Image (spheres, rainbow, N blue to C red):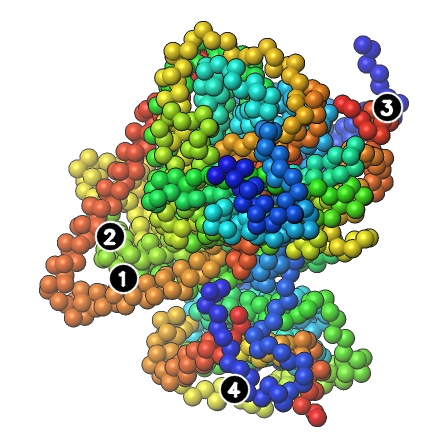
Amino acid sequence: MASITLPWVQRDTEKLSNYREKAIRLLAFIALAHIPIILGAWFLLDPLSTKPADLQDSKVLLVPPLCLGSIGGMLLFAGAAFAIYAYELIGRVLSAPWVAFIIFIGAIFGIVIGVWLHAEILMTVQRDWMPAKETSVIPFVGIEYDHTVQSIYQNNLEGKSVDFPLIGAISIDTPILAYLMFPLQFPLVRDLVAVGGIIGFISLIPGFGIWWERKVAGRIQSRMGPMRAGGWHGWAQSAADGIKLAFKEDYVPPGGDGVLFRLAPYITFIPPICAFIALPFATAWVFRDLDVALIFILAMLGIEVMGVILAGWASNNKWSVYGAMREACQMVSYEIPMGMALLIPVMTAGSLSLTGIAEAQSGGFWTWFVFVNPWCFLAFFLYYVASLASCKRAPFDLPESESELVAGFLTEYSGFRWSMFFFGEYVAMYVVCGLAAILFLGGWMSPFPASSAEWFIAQANIENGMLQTLVKSLLAANPIWFILKATFLFFVQLWIRWTLPRIRIDQVLYACVQVLLPATMVVLLGNTLWILGVSENGLNLGWLIAIDGIINKILAAAGVLTLVGIVGIAAYGYRNNKKLVGWLAVDQLPGK
Amino acid sequence: MAPEEIAEILKDTFGASITDTEFESAHPRVVVAADAWPEVAAFLRDDDRLQLNFLRSISAVDYLEDDKFAAVYDLASYRPGKTDSDAWALTNAVAVQVWTDRNDPHIPSVAHVWRAADWHEREAYDLMGVIFDNHPDSVEGLNGFHPRRILCPDDWEGHPLQKDYAFPMEYHGIPAVTELNQTRPIH
Amino acid sequence: MDSVAAEQGRSLKDHMDDLAFYIFAAISVASAFGVVVSQNIVRTALFLLGTLGGVAGLYFLLDANLIAVIQLIVYAGGTLILIVFGIMLTSKSPWAEFKPPKSQIVLAAFVGLLMFIGITSLTLSGEVNWAARATKTPLATSPKVAEAGEALLTTYLVPFEVDLTAIGAAYLAKTEK
Amino acid sequence: MADVILESQPDINADLSSDQIQQQDLQTEEMLVNMGPQHPATHGVLRVVLRTDGEMVLEAVPHIGYLHRCAEKIGETVAPYQYIPYTDRMDYLAGMNNNLAFAQAVEKLTGLESEITERTKLIRIVFAELNRIASHLVSFGTYGLDLGAFTPFLYAFREREYILDLFESACGARLTYSYITVGGVTDDLPERFVDITREFLDYFEPKVHEYNLLLSHNHIFIKRTANVGVITAQEALDYGLSGPVLRGSGVNFDLRKQPGSGYEEFDFNVPVGQGEKGTVGDCWDRYIVRVSEMLESVKIIRQALDKLDGTEGQETLHKKGKTLKLPADEIYYEIENPRGQLGFFVRGNGSAIPDRVKARGPSFCNLCVTEKVCEDVLLGDVAAIIGSIDVVMGEVDR
Amino acid sequence: MLAVGLSHYLVLSALLFSLGVVCMATKRNAIGILIGVELVLNSANVNLIAFSKFQTGLVDGQVFAVFVILLAAAEAALAIAIFMNFYNNLQTVDVDRGDVLRG
C-alpha cells in the first residue's frame, strides 16, 4: 500500500530538514570563530616559556582562562554541530545497552577519581605550601580569625612538586598545573567543590533510592520489579522516570493560588538538602562542622511542613486540604519525641557535635550507643519510629494515602513538581537514617575497634602509605561504613513500607501523644539516672557498672544475632526461591 | 410451613383483602390487595408462627395486555438453630403479589417493615414506574411524591423496563443510535 | 568607629561575611515589606517565613548558632504552623480582601517612616557611647552553645521557669477542637 | 484528637453578647466531599457523597447507576442460553456462580433439572467453588490495599492466576466464562484437569495460613478493622444482607447448607463471625469469614473431585438446552454467590424468550447498609467499611 | 563599603521594627496583626544578639533572645485561641467588626 504523506506533514518535514541544516551551519561558524582567539592568546602568552613566578601581574593572569575557555567553547560547539549532523549514527551507537552501561560506570569512576585527585591536591596544597597559619585578632572584639595569606606566589613555585602516590611526583614548573593550583587556595572555591560533591551525592540518593524501593517492593511481592529500562535489572529506571516526569504537562489547578502552588515543592525540597550541610560523612568529610549540627538538622526537617501545607492549600482541592492538615499535625507532633530521643545519645556521649558523638563510639561495635545501655537501645527504636512519622513513611504515610485521600496533598501535582516532592522525601529519609546511623550505630566507625588497625599494620608491617590508609579505613573509620549503615536503615524503611498497612489519623496522634512522648520522657529520665550511676565523677555505683557491662554484652550479642538472622533468612529465601513460587509451571496444563 | 398453610392463616385473619392464591406454579404466591398490603406485611413479619423477617427481593412485572403492573415480594423466615453452632434454617419461603393499575400504579411502601425494601422499591419505581407511596426516600414529582430514582439520572423521563417504552433519541445533547432507528430495538 | 585600623586585616572571609550580611538583610527586609503589602493572608504567612529565614541567617552571621537554630525550630517550625492553623480555621475564604481605607494606609506609612528616621538618627548620632556601657568583661571566644545552655540554667533560671509555665498556660487555654 | 472531645466550658456571659451566638464549640463549617465515581477506595464506579466536619464523616450517601447496562431489559429479548454471557458480566469476579444461578433457575422453571447428569452437577460445583476462592482472593487483596498494605494484593493475584489458568484450560476464558449453560456445561473437562486441580489445592492450602500471619493477625490491621462498622444480626436481617456480610454479624446462614442446594453430600462447616478481635459484626469479622471460607471451599472441591472419578462416561450437555420453551409461569431461585445470595426471578410466556428476568444482586442489597454504618466515623474508616462489604459494581447496577 | 559593624544591625532592626508597626496598623485581619507583632519581636531579637556580639561579647543577649522566642510562641498560641473565639462569635476575623460591646 503506497504510503500517503498528508500535505501538512509534507510541509513540516521540509521545514524541519532545513532547520537542521541551519543549526549545523550556525554552530560550525561559532566553533570556527574561536580559533583566532586561541591563536592570538597562544602567541601573546607563549605558555611553554613563562615561569610560574611571573604570573604575578593580573594581566597575565587573565590570559590563560581566556585561552582555556575558548578552546573548551570551540570543542563544545563543534561537538554540538556533529551531534546534529550524525544523529542517526549516534542514536544507533547509544541504543546498545552496554554502551549506556559503560557511560554510566565511566561517569561513576570518573567522579570517584576526580574527587580523590582533588582531595590529594588539596592536602598537598594545605600541608606543604600554605605558610603557617597567621591569626590576626580583630582589635576590640578579640575574636580570632584564621585566614591564609592571599597569594600563593610569595614563596615561588619552583622546585615544588605534588607526589601522587600511584602516579609518582609531578613537579610544578610548568604553568598549566600552577593555574590549576591557584584557585584551590581560596576557601570559597573549596566550598564550591564541596557543594558540588554534596549535590552529586544527594542527587544520587533519590535516583538510587527510587529504583531500589521498586526492586525491594518487587522482591517482597514475589515479582521482579523494573527489569527493562537501561539493561541489567532496569538500573536506569529512575533516570527514565525523571526524564518522563520532566516532560509531563505543566498543570496548575485553576482557582488555586498559582504562586504558592509553584513555590510549595521548593519549600519542601530545599530544607532536606540544607540538612546535608551539617551531616558529617567522616571526621573531616563535613561541609560545616556546626556545633549545633543535631538541632540544625531537626530544624530543617521542621521547615518542610510549611511547604506541604502550602501545597495542600494552593491546590484548591478538598482532598489535598485534608492531606495538608493531616501532614501538619503529624509532623509537628512527632518532632517532639524525635527531638527528645536524640538527646539520649548526646547525653551518653557528653557532646552536642555529631563528630564528637561518633568518636565516642569508636571502640568496636559493642561500644555503639545502641548496645551501650538499655535506655539507648530503647531510644533507638523510639527515634526510628518518630523519624518514620516525620518522613511520612510506612505506617504513618497518611498525608498521601492513596486509598483514602486519592493522593493527599499531591493530588493536583504532576510532572516535574511531583518529582520535586519525591526528591525531597527521599533525601529527608536518607538524612534521618544518616542521623540514626551516626547517633546510635557509630556513624563511620567500623565494627572492629580502632586499635585493631594499628595492630594489623604492625603485624603485617605494611609501609606503603596507600595500603595503610586502606587498612585504616577498613578497620578503623571510613565514610563507606557510614553509607553502609545509613543504607541498611534506608532498606528497613522500605521493608516496613511494603509489609505494614496504614494506621488511622487519630491513632497516629494517639500514638504520638499518649505512647511515644511518655515513653521518650521515661527513657530520658532512665538514661540520666543510669549515666549518673555509672560515670566515675557521678555516683559511681559498683553494682550498676557490673550490670551495665553484662547488659552491654547481651545487647551486643542480640545485635549480632539479628544481623545474622536477617542475612540467614535472605539466604534461605534466595536458595530455594524456585520452590516457593514457581513449582506449578503453568505450561503443564493441557491444551496450552 | 407450606405456602398453602400460610395462605390459610392470612385468609382467616384478613379475609377479603387476600384476593387470590396461585399454588400450582413453580413460584407459589398469595395475591394481596394493594391498600391492605402494609398491614399484611407487618403481620407476616411479627406473627410468631410466620416470622418472615427476610425480604429476599421485589420484582415488578409489566402485564401490558391486561393493563396491569404486579409487584412480587419474595419473603422468607430465617430461624436460628437450637444451639449457636448449628445452622440457621430457611423456612416459610412464600411470595406475595400485589396488582396495581398500569396508568395509575400506586402501591403503599413497606420500607418501614423491612429496611431492605427501601432500595428495591426505588429500583422498581426507577425501572418499571410503580409508585410506592410514603416511601422514606421520596421526592416531589409531577403528580405527587414518588421514590427517588436509583439507577437512572434524576432527570430521566420514562421507565425503561416498561414494555411500551420508547427509547429517547437524545439526552442532554448526546445522540442515541439504535439499529435502523427502531423505537423498540430487538437485538 | 576605628574602621580604618581594621581595613588591612580584612581577609576574603570578612568580605564574604559582609556580602552574606547584605544578602540576609535584603531577604528579611524584602519579605517584611511583602508582609506589609500583600493582601492575601496566606501570602503574608509565607513572607513571614521569609523574614524568619533571613533573620536566622543573620544570627548565624553573628555567631549565635544556638539562637538561629532555636529560631528555626520554634519560630519557623512551630509558631508559623500555629499561625497557618489559625488562618485556616478562622477564615471563610483566605482571599477575602480586608481593604483598609486609603487614608489609614497613608497615615500608618507616614508614622512608620517617622519612627524609622527617629531611631536611626538616634543610633548613628553616636552620643550614646557604646563601649562605656559594657558592664561585664567580654569573652575571648564567641559564646559557644555550652555557655548559652549553662547561663540559661544558672543565672537565668527564674525567667526560664516563667517561660515554661507561660507555655503550659497557653497549652491549657487552647480550646480548638 | 477525634475521640478526645474537649468540651469547652459554657460561656458565662453568653447572653450579654449579640444574639447570633448559638453553640459554644468552634463551629467549623461542614464540607460535602465527593468520594466520587473515580476513587481508589470505591471498587469500581461507586460515588459516595460524604458530609464531613473536619475528619469526622457525619453522613455518607451512596449514589449508584454509573455501570447500568440494562441487563434486565435485554433479558426480555434473548433466549435463556443466549442470556448466559450477560450473567457473566454482572458479578465479573464470580462469572461461574452467576451462570450457575441463571442456568438452574431456567432448568427448575422448565423441569429440565431432573435430566441433568450427576457428572454435570459435580463439575458445576467444582467450578463454582474454585470461582468462590478466586473471588475471595480478590476481595482479600483489595481490602489490604484499602488499608495501605500493598503486598497481600500481589500474593492474592499470584494464587488467583493459577485458578484462572485452570478455567482457561477448561473453557478458554479467564473472566467471562459462559461455561455453565442451560442444560449442563459447554464441554467436558480436559484430561489431566482433576490431578492438576488437586496439586493446586495442596499448594494453596498452606498459603491461606501465610495470609493470616501476614495481614489478619497484624496488629495495625486489627486496630484499623476491629470495632469498626459494626452491624448487628438483627440489622443485617432487616437490611436483607447476605453472604459473608450476614455471616460476619453472627448469623450462621448459608444457602449451601439448606436442603435442595446440591451440597448435601459434602461436609464442610460455615465460618461465622464471633467477635474474636472486637465486637461481633465488625469489619474484621467479615474479613476473617471470607478468608476461612476459602479453606472450606478447598474441602468441598476435594470431596467433589473424589466423586468425579466415578462418573467418567456421562454426557455433560443436554440437547434440549437450546430449544427450550418457557412455560407461562415464573420462578425465583437463589444460590450462594461469593458475595451473598444471587437470586433470579424468571417469568416465561410460553415462547422461547422470557417475559421478565430480574436479578437480585447481593452487592446491591449489601450496599444499602453503608448509609447506616458510615455515620460518625472517620474518613479512614469509610474506606475500611466499604472494603469489608466487598461490593462489585457490575452486580449493583446490572 | 564600611565593614559590617553594630550600626548596620541597628539600622536593620529599626527598619524591621517600623515595618512591623506599619503592618500592625494597616492589617484589618487579626492574624495580620499577630504577624506584625512577630515582626516587631524579631527586630528586637536582632538588636539583642547584635549587642551581645559587638558590644558585650557575653551570652546574656542570646539568652534573652531565647526567652523572647519562647514567649512569642506562647503568646501566638493564646492569640490564636482568642481569635478563634472571636471568629466563633462574629463569624469573621475582621478586627473593625469587633465593636459589639460599643452598646
Q: Give residue D90's position: percent from left, percent from top.
A: 61, 32
From this view, report whether residue A26 is shown above or below residue E53. Answer: above
From this view, report whether residue D180 is shown above or below residue A142. Answer: above
Q: On the image, numbered disc 4 is attached to which residue?
A: C130
Could you tell me which chain the residue with mark 2 belongs to?
Answer: A
Q: On the image, numbered disc 1 is attached to which residue?
A: A348
**Res. D94 visible in picture:** yes
Q: On the image, numbered disc 3 is attached to which residue?
A: B180
Q: Give residue D186's position: percent from left, percent from top.
A: 56, 14
Residue in the picture at 85% in, 27% down: B182
Q: Nearer the viewer, mark 1 or mark 3?
A: 3
Question: Which residue type carries mark 4?
Answer: Trp
Residue in front for this viewpoint, D100 or C117? D100
Residue in front for this viewpoint, A58 or D128? D128
Q: CA distance from mark 2 to mark 1?
A: 12 Å
Could you tell me which chain the residue with mark 4 belongs to?
Answer: C
Q: Nearer the viewer, mark 4 or mark 3?
A: 3
Residue C28, label in figure: none
Q: CA distance from mark 4 to mark 3?
A: 101 Å
Residue in front for this viewpoint, A225 or A419? A225
Residue in the picture at 63% in, 64% down: D30
Name the residue at the top extreme. Answer: D313
Residue A371, label in figure: 2
**Res. A393 visible in picture:** no
Residue neighbourhood size for the residue with mark 4, other residues' Cα within 10 Å, grouped as few (<14), some (14–19), many (≥20): few
